[in-house]
Image: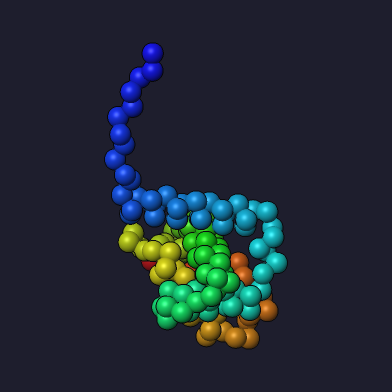
């Protein structure tokens, strides 16, 4: 006796995209934890940011650009969300609480954070030798400080 299964409705495209983005962010976070990407410099991250720009904004990219664009989005998205959770929002100083850290906008997107990081990298070429995760933290913290 086999039970008949009801045909399932196709999952909406938006939901599939949300699931895929969560997978990418998880992969980026796990990659951050392994230490491999900790060796990336700002220069390498800027190369990936430019590949993202070619694919998403200019609509002209190679397969290599596409891979770099996804890696860039995953790295920036994973790092940003991780930092927003790990950096304390307040510190006690001189008898009062002082805002600090990263306070992301409620409607913020990974694409928005990626653009902030790309602009920061382009505006600070003398800093591109520094580790990518440090530059991402600085860019996001400057753009979205807690107030």
Task: Identify which residue is drawn at 46% across, 75% down.
Answer: 55
| Residue 135: percent from left, percent from top | 58, 72
Tell me the quarter of the image containing the C terminus: bottom left
On screen, 43 above or below 66? below
Q: Residue furthest top?
A: 1
The answer to whether 39 appears left or right of 145 in the picture is right
The picture quadrant where one finds residue 97 is bottom left
Task: Identify which residue is drawn at 63% across, 86% down.
Answer: 126
Task: Identify which residue is drawn at 57% across, 78% down.
Answer: 46
The picture quadrant where one finds residue 145 is bottom left
Q: Compare residues 87 and 54 and report the one nearer the observer.
A: 54
On screen, 52 above or below 10? below
| Residue 142: percent from left, percent from top | 47, 73
Q: Compare residues 95 and 118 and report the one nearer the observer.
A: 118
The picture quadrant where one finds residue 105 is bottom left
Whether residue 52 is visible: yes
Q: Compare residues 34 and 94 and report the one nearer the observer.
A: 34
Tell me the quarter of the image containing the N terminus: top left
Q: How many marks?
A: 0
| Residue 19: percent from left, percent from top | 42, 49
Whether residue 92 is visible: no
Q: How are the residues colored?
A: rainbow
The answer to whether 31 appears left or right of 118 in the picture is right
| Residue 50: percent from left, percent from top | 53, 79
Task: Identify which residue is drawn at 67% across, 63% down.
Answer: 38
């Amino acid at each position: 006796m086999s039970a008949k299964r009801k045909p399932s409705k196709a999952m909406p495209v938006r939901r599939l995209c949300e699931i895929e983005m969560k997978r990418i962010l998880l992969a980026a976070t796990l990659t951050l934890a392994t230490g491999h990407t900790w060796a990336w410099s700002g220069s390498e991250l800027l190369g990936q940011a430019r590949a993202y720009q070619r694919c998403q904004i200019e609509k002209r990219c190679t397969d290599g650009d596409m891979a770099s664009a996804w890696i860039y989005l995953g790295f920036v998205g994973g790092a940003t969300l991780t930092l927003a959770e790990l950096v304390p929002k307040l510190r006690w100083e001189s008898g009062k609480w002082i805002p600090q850290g990263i306070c992301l906008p409620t409607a913020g997107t990974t694409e928005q954070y990626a653009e902030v990081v790309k602009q920061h990298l382009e505006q600070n070429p003398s800093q591109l030798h520094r580790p990518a995760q440090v530059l991402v933290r600085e860019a996001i913290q400057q753009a979205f400080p807690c107030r």
